[in-house]
Image (tube, rainbow, N blue to C red):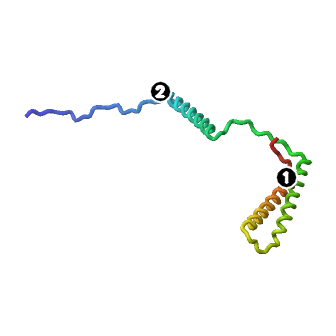
């Protein structure tokens, strides 16, 4: 048998890290990423436009508001107080009825009570608020 001598010494392999800093595109954003970013921006824009069309929203100019004059404010306050007096008069007539016979009477009384509370709240807000802005 013939003896073969195999060299058991491994060959030397260059295991040093490549120097990435020396590459000419080091530190620069790859061009494909800027393209992807632009595509994403266009898609978002298209989706927003589609959503606005579906919901019927248009880009409108901001609404203009005008300040309510002191005279108009006083007239409004007096009208609310007058309405409160009218409803309160009707409510007081129903308040003395002990047995409300029908569902209609019960609902009417509850509706009047709710409306009186709302009017009281509105009158209070109108009295303590500063300038009031309304749509022209």
In this picture, residue 128 sits left or right of residue 109 = right
Tell me how far mark 2 sits from mark 1, CA to CA. 70 Å
Is tag 2's residue or tag 1's residue first in the polypeptide sequence? 2
Above/below status of 16 relative to 66: above
Considering every residue shown, the one lying at the far bottom of the view is: 98
User: Which sits in the foreground, 47 or 107?
Assistant: 107
In this picture, residue 68 sits left or right of residue 14 = right
Name the residue rendered at 76%, 71% in the picture: 100
The image position of residue 62, as x and y in percent, is 75, 38
Name the residue rendered at 90%, 51% in the picture: 75
User: Which sits in the foreground, 16 or 25?
Assistant: 25
Question: In the rendered image, which residue does mark 2 sit on?
Answer: 22
In this picture, residue 87 sits left or right of residue 15 = right
Quarter holding the C terminus? top right
Name the residue rendered at 63%, 38% in the picture: 52
Question: In the rendered image, which residue does mark 1 sit on?
Answer: 129
Above/below status of 70 relative to 91: above
Q: Quadrant of residue 60?
A: top right
Give the secondary structure at mark 1.
loop
Q: Which mark is residue 46?
A: none
User: Which sits in the foreground, 79 or 86?
Assistant: 86
Quarter holding the N terminus? top left
User: Which sits in the foreground, 21 or 82?
Assistant: 82
Please tell me how crowded label 1 is: few (under 14), some (14-19), or many (20+) other residues with Cα within 10 Å.
few
Name the residue rendered at 86%, 48% in the picture: 131
Give the secondary structure at mark 2.
helix
In this picture, residue 9 sits left or right of residue 93 = left
Q: Quadrant of residue 56?
A: top right
């Amino acid at each position: 048998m013939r003896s073969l001598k195999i060299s058991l010494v491994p060959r030397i392999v260059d295991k040093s890290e490549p120097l990435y800093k020396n590459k000419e595109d080091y530190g620069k954003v790859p061009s494909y990423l800027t393209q992807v970013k632009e595509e994403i921006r266009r898609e978002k824009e298209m989706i927003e436009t589609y959503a606005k069309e579906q919901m019927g929203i248009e880009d409108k100019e901001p609404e203009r508001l005008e300040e309510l004059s002191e005279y108009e404010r006083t007239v409004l306050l007096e009208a609310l107080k007058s309405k409160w007096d009218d409803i309160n008069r009707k409510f007081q007539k129903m308040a003395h009825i002990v047995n409300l016979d029908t569902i209609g009477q019960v609902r009417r009384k509850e509706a009047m009570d709710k409306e009186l509370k709302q009017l009281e709240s509105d009158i209070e807000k109108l009295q303590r608020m500063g300038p009031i802005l309304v749509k022209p």
